[in-house]
Image (spheres, rainbow, N blue to C red):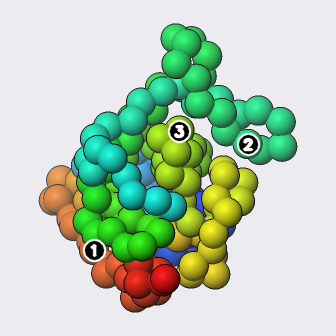
Amino acid sequence: SFIVHRLDRDTSGLMLSARSARDQKILQQNWDEIILERTYAAVCEGMVDPPGGEISSYLREEGALRMVSDQRPGSGRWAVTRYQTLRTGNHFSLLKVTLRTGRKNQIRVHLQDIGHPVAGDKKYGSVMNPVGRLALHAMTLVFRHPVTGTVLRFETPVPRKFFHALKQA
């Protein structure tokens, strides 16, 4: 199996792998045309207001593998993240997050930008860890098969721990 893309450490969910190095290369080189949808579930700190929206900025790597968000054109690679609140609890919100671009640590940085870091993400400002790891889960992956052109959709449910986090007092 040949891994086509990566997930952040402690992120659960779907990943795409190829059967051969040649297929891996095709998928990686044509990623932006092949991938039609990537959706994540994220438990973030606080009650997100507005409950849905879009976050956009330029992202660049700085220092010890840490990504930084900036609004100045040319200060990094453009990144766009859409989010929708699915449920709220006492201290956390469960979001559906859709990537319009795929940058390193994009969801983590963008949720920090709006003051609602991913739970369990000390690197990007979280102070609570209700699931014992980064509360981020790759939930949906939709892509066009590079050879047959068939659209394939894969989904996995939100981890139960994410729902339990919402019930914490």
The location of residue 3, given as percent across then percent down, is 55, 64
The residue drawn where x is 35% and y is 78% is 158
Q: Is residue 16 above or below residue 114?
A: below
Image quarter of residue 82: top left
Q: Which residue is mark 1?
A: 155
Front residue of 36 and 1: 36
User: Which numbered disc, 1 or 3, marks the residue closer to the eye?
Assistant: 3
Give the CA distance from mark 2 to mark 1: 29 Å
The location of residue 98, given as percent across then percent down, is 32, 51
The location of residue 32, given as percent across then percent down, is 36, 39
Residue 66 is labelled as: 2
Give the CA distance from mark 1 to mark 3: 28 Å
Left or right of 88 in this view: 24: right
Of callouts 1 and 3, the N-terminal one: 3
Q: Is residue 134 above or below residue 46?
A: below
The location of residue 73, given as percent across then percent down, is 52, 11
SS for callout 2: strand
